[in-house]
Amino acid sequence: MRILALDIGEKRIGVAVSDPTQRVASPVCVLDAPQALASKRDFERLQQDYDDIELLLVGLPRSLDGTEGPQAARVREVAVRIGELTGLPLAYCDERLSSVEASRRMAEAGADSRARRGSVDMVAAALMLQAYLDEKWSDR
């Protein structure tokens, strides 16, 4: 069973998915946030492409001291709406600095700023999901 991960931002939603064994995370796509929230179509397509999704993992933007501010409250609100659209249970994880790390890794790989802007959100979702998976397997 797979986990679908979302990095929810103001303008875009980065999407990543785990493999069926829940050991490896892969970036999938970037959705336009306002459009994705207005329509179930994107999430229905994802559920058709990955018909064995069992969990929706959403990254919470926490402050450096670990507290949740207004941005985290907005992300929780959007996540609940997406959870209702998909019928998937929700889990949250810390996504502090995931976009910064994704941008850094993409730059190191030679991606120019234009390429990074278009895909940094899905790479951030994959990094966040991989950290979640790694922690899950280290607890066993």
Image (cartoon, grey):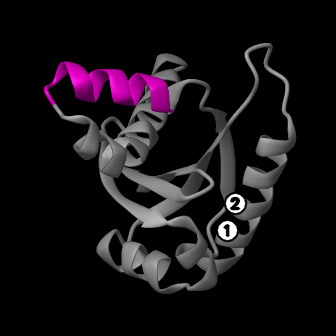
Mark 1 and mark 2: span between their CA atoms?
6 Å
Query: What secondary structure do most residues of the magenta stretch adopt?
Result: helix
Q: Quadrant of residue 88?
A: bottom right
Q: Residue 89: x percent and y percent?
A: 67, 61
Residue 83: image tag: 1
At label 1, the amino acid type is: Gly
Provide the residue span drawn in magenta: 99-110
- Residue under the image location 42 percent in, 75 percent down: 47
Residue at 29%, 23% in the rendered image: 105
Whether residue 116 is situated above or below residue 137 in the rendered picture = below
Seen from the viewer's position, the closer of residues 101 and 22 is 101
Q: Residue lying farthest left?
A: 110
| Residue sitting farthest toward the top | 65
* Residue at 32% from the left image edge and 51% from the top image edge: 118
Q: Are marks 1 and 2 in contact (CB under 8 Å)?
A: yes
Disc 1, SS = helix
Amino acid on which disc 2 is placed? Ala
The 10 Å Cα crowd at callout 1, few under 14, some 14 to 19, many 20 or more, is some
Q: Which residue is mark 2?
A: 79
Q: Secondary structure at mark 2?
A: helix
Q: Is 120 positioned to the left or the right of 4 in the image?
A: left
